[in-house]
Amino acid sequence: MDDPWKSMPNDRGFESESRMVEVEDGWRLRVITCKPLTKQNNPPVVMVPGWNSVFEGWREIIEAWAPSRMIIYIETREKGSAESTRESSRSTMSIGQSVQDLKTLASKLPEMSSECDFFASSLGATVLLEALAMGALNARSVSLLAPNISFDFPLWSRPLIAMPSFLYPPLIRAAILYLNLRLKDDGQKIRYRRTLLASNVKRLRLSALSNGSYKMSVDLTRINSRIALITAESDTLHAGSAVGFLAEKLPNATTIEVPSNQFAHDREIIPILEAFQDDQRS
């Protein structure tokens, strides 16, 4: 079985490379950069996927977009692709640490030095909002799929999360069963199953322990970027109340309803995102 943390795009009309970029405290994060073969005037798109999300879940949209846009795809440190010379802990897996990582990457990657269009999902969307609130990034536009303002794990799972890592394989199987029962979107079920089976068990546990107490408390009124809040009624996993809260608090937010969470991982979302990015939505 191929390593899901080494997956790369199939280059058609673009070229791609994978780099391990050092952030801090002995950590290196994987960044995939895709560049069109012909010169384009469009700003780069920076993608920050959700919690433990694997590249395969975003392959279609990246391969469809990359011939016309530079794509910078960032894998945060809870993912199995990250490398570390130090022991992991709850603090190393915190959202605050991922915000600092994003700030460090922006200072190291010339592609992110000018204003970009950002597209982030779930945990990635939360990290991006925190980074924008502290003024760590310049954004032409920001599109957020199913952002979280807190992480409310099911009551039955909370005692299990605190268990030692070696007990996690049964928990992962239970989580897959739970998601199969709860989720309506078949594509979303497949992506989450793939994500859980590919997880670095120790990091997954530490990230869950760290995120379980998270509540967004930043001053959202400081974010002046245009922000699209992408939501799907069929997405029963991500709280719709978060989108309502953010739509009320963010000064320049637009809510975009899509048919399903899976739709936002497919090429059909691209014209919708680009219309918003170019401020052409009526």
Image (cartoon, helix red, strand yellow):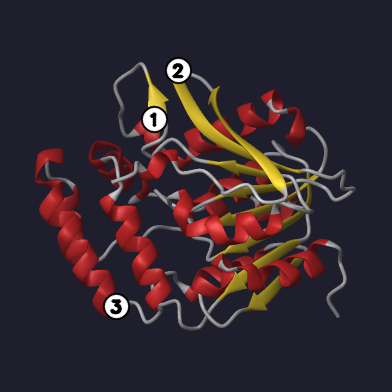
- Residue 226, picture quadrant: bottom right
Q: How far apart are marks 1 and 3 (CA)?
A: 30 Å
For image coordinates 62% across by 27% down, the residue present is: 104
Q: Are marks 2 and 1 in contact (CB under 8 Å)?
A: yes
Check the picture and name the quadrant holding the C terminus: bottom right
How far from the left and from the top, in percent, is residue 258? 60, 79
Q: What element carries label 1?
A: helix
Query: In the displayed structure, would residue 140 be above or below residue 282?
Result: above
Type of amino acid under label 3: Arg
Q: Name the residue under label 1.
A: 92
The answer to whether residue 157 shows anywhere in this view is yes
- Residue 272, picture quadrant: bottom right
Label whose residue precedes the other's in the sequence (3 or 2): 2
The answer to whether residue 149 shows anywhere in this view is no
The local crowd at label 3, few if under 14, some if 14 to 19, many if 20 or more residues have their Cα within 10 Å, is: few
How far from the left and from the top, in percent, is residue 131? 63, 42
How far from the left and from the top, in percent, is residue 222? 73, 50
The local crowd at label 2, few if under 14, some if 14 to 19, many if 20 or more residues have their Cα within 10 Å, is: few
For image coordinates 32% across by 34% down, the residue present is: 90
The local crowd at label 1, few if under 14, some if 14 to 19, many if 20 or more residues have their Cα within 10 Å, is: many
Q: Which residue lies furthest to the front in this view?
A: 12
Query: In the displayed structure, would residue 200 be above or below residue 24?
Result: below
